[in-house]
Image (cartoon, grey):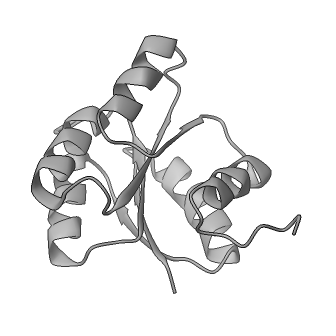
Amino acid sequence: MPECLVVDDSRTVRRAARRMLEARGFSVREAEDGQQALDACRAAMPTLVLLDWNMPVMDGITFLHRARAEFGPDEPRIMLCTTESDFSRIVAALEGGAQEYIMKPFDDAILAGKLEVLGLLPDEAA
């Protein structure tokens, strides 16, 4: 069973993402900030990190850079999830090592499409 670490300082966002991911067969852990997320990855590497950009303690982009420096370019797969719509921010996230980017608010269909792109869901069109 693939595991997703949902990292967001909003409990509501974490709860909504958990519901969508669990319905698609993921086990889910949660973290409130980038430092908790880094500690969680060190304890047990998730398949995917759904990562908020703007958080206290350690923001998402700092987590992204530290995770890539510590764990390498491929694990865990990281999907930035944020309200940041400026194209330069999206480019910075992808160049920093994120495999995907999703805008808030998102729904199940949008999340499922991104999971398919990452190869974490069977392609339902096939």
Q: Nearer the viewer, residue 21 or 122?
A: 122
Relative to residue 9, is residue 95 depicted above or below?
above
Q: Is residue 18 left or right of residue 75?
A: right
Q: Position of residue 80 (x, y in %)?
A: 44, 41
Q: Is residue 112 left or right of residue 35?
A: right
Q: Nearer the viewer, residue 89 or 40?
A: 89
Residue drawn at 61 percent across, 68 percent down: 21
Residue drawn at 49 percent across, 55 percent down: 14
Residue drawn at 51 percent across, 14 percent down: 87
Name the residue furthest front: 126
Residue drawn at 60 percent across, 34 percent down: 104
Name the residue furthest right: 125
Q: Position of residue 100 (x, y in %)?
A: 51, 43
On-image quarter of the C terminus: bottom right
Q: Position of residue 94 (x, y in %)?
A: 40, 33
Q: Position of residue 121 (x, y in %)?
A: 67, 70
Name the residue furthest bottom: 1
Tally the numbered discs. 0
Q: Nearer the viewer, residue 60 or 77?
A: 77
